[in-house]
Image: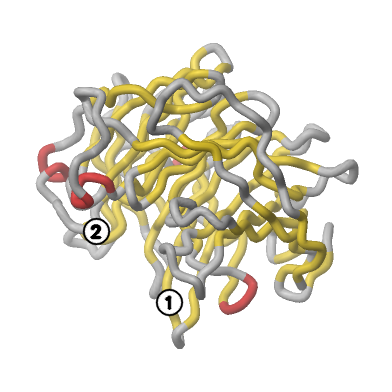
């Protein structure tokens, strides 16, 4: 059930680049998920509510990946058209997500500080925050088609500036399709592989039929693989504070989207291993959309929450959703 349309005006932000813009994003609170009311249990998670986002600006949409980029629930996403979309998750007095405010959009730049020149190079699919001493200082972005990973500076929680290319394996660079690099996440301090970057592919399959993955790290580096649920592919990943890995999977069945969220124990995220994981959540049909984002953050009440978001592909019949859950005891 969706209720209570909430039009959200932008919080004024100083624009330091001529090609950056502020957007007004409206939101409708979502209080029901799969027939379960707020604070009810859905599979192995607790439903905390969500929003459906809309904007009259046609640059808003195509959202992939979600990263926590600062305090006070500042976040950033990337767009299929080569933009950063940043803002702040807004909560009401009851601790429910009710909006996305202070929204800013600007082109992702290449290593020379210019906007990406062609659509082939703009297809950003993943974003993860680089955290040092507990503070996000940069983001790493994964691209498909022209497959690569690049790092960008953060200024007050907003990513931008010239790209700094990150070296990845040649086999991945040479895989230039829209099913190559789909998910990027960075292990937190509580992980056995703290600081390592996990790269997870959508359609690159090894000889055993598993999704190929790779760890970028000094002490933890090399290949590993991931076993997805049937008929779905990995589309994003995020680590819990203790190092356990969340993998979001997405597919289509009977002309409707499906999704699965899996948890891989921290000890299983290591070079040479096959990651399997347990199912935390499954959904299909009207409860979800084209789910392509997962992130972990601390809500205003101190609770660790999982946010799952969708990509509307700039289509009128798809939605930009942000759905929040907590782990059940």
Q: Which quadrant would residue 221 be assigned to in this image?
A: top left
Q: Residue at x 73, y 53 (%)?
A: 7
Relative placement, left or right, of 17 versus 246 is left
Assign a secondary structure to mark 1: strand
The reply, left or right, for residue 324 in relation to residue 111 is right
Measured along the vertical axis of the image, is residue 216 above or below residue 232?
A: above
What's the mark number on residue 178? 2
Question: x and y percent of residue 20 in the render?
Answer: 44, 33
Q: Is residue 176 left or right of residue 298?
A: left
Using the image, tell me which numbered label, if any, was put on residue 202: none
Q: If you read the primary sequence from the N terminus, does the residue marked by circle 2 or circle 1 appear first?
A: 2
Up-down relation of residue 116 to residue 236 (above or below): above
The quarter in which the N terminus is drawn is: bottom right
Which residue reaches farthest right?
A: 93
Q: Which residue is mark 1?
A: 252
Residue at (52% x, 48% y) in the render = 246
Label 2 element class: loop
Q: Determine the CA span between mark 2 and mark 1.
A: 16 Å
Whole-percent x and y of residue 294? 53, 49
Q: Nearer the viewer, residue 166 or 218?
A: 166
Neighbour tally class for label 2: few under 14, some 14-19, many 20 plus, Cα within 10 Å = some
In this rendering, the answer to whether 194 lies above or below 205 is above
Q: Residues within 10 Å of mark 1 (few under 14, many from 20)?
A: some
Can residue 166 be seen from the camera position used here?
no
Name the residue rendered at 20%, 23% in the picture: 112
Q: Which residue appears at 84% of the width and 44% of the height? A: 92
Q: Position of residue 327 (x, y in %)?
A: 71, 49
């Amino acid at each position: 059930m969706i209720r209570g349309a909430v039009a959200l005006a932008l919080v004024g932000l100083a624009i330091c680049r001529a090609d950056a813009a502020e957007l007004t994003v409206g939101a409708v609170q979502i209080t029901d998920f799969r027939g379960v009311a707020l604070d009810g249990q859905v599979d192995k998670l607790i439903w905390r509510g969500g929003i459906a986002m809309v904007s009259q600006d046609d640059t808003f949409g195509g959202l992939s990946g979600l990263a926590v980029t600062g305090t006070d629930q500042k976040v950033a996403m990337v767009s299929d058209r080569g933009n950063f979309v940043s803002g702040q998750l807004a909560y009401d007095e009851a601790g429910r997500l009710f909006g996305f405010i202070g929204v800013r959009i600007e082109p992702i730049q290449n290593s020379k500080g210019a906007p990406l020149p062609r659509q082939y190079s703009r297809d950003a699919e993943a974003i993860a925050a680089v955290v040092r001493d507990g503070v996000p200082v940069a983001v790493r972005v994964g691209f498909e088609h022209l497959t690569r990973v690049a790092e960008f500076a953060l200024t007050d929680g907003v990513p931008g500036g010239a790209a700094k290319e990150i070296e990845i394996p040649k086999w991945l660079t040479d895989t230039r399709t829209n099913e190559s690099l789909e998910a990027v996440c960075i292990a937190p301090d509580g992980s056995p592989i703290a600081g390592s970057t996990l790269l997870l592919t959508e359609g690159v399959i090894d000889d055993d039929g598993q999704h190929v993955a790779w760890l970028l790290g000094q002490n933890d580096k090399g290949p590993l693989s991931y076993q997805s649920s049937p008929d779905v592919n990995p589309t994003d990943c995020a680590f819990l504070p203790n190092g356990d890995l969340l993998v979001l999977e997405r597919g289509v069945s009977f002309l409707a989207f499906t999704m699965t969220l899996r948890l891989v124990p921290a000890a299983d995220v290591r070079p040479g291993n096959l990651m399997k994981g347990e199912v935390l959540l499954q959904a299909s049909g009207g409860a979800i959309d084209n789910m392509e984002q997962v992130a972990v953050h601390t809500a205003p009440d101190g609770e660790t929450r999982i946010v799952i978001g969708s990509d509307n592909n700039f289509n009128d019949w798809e939605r930009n959703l942000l759905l929040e859950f907590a782990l059940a005891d």
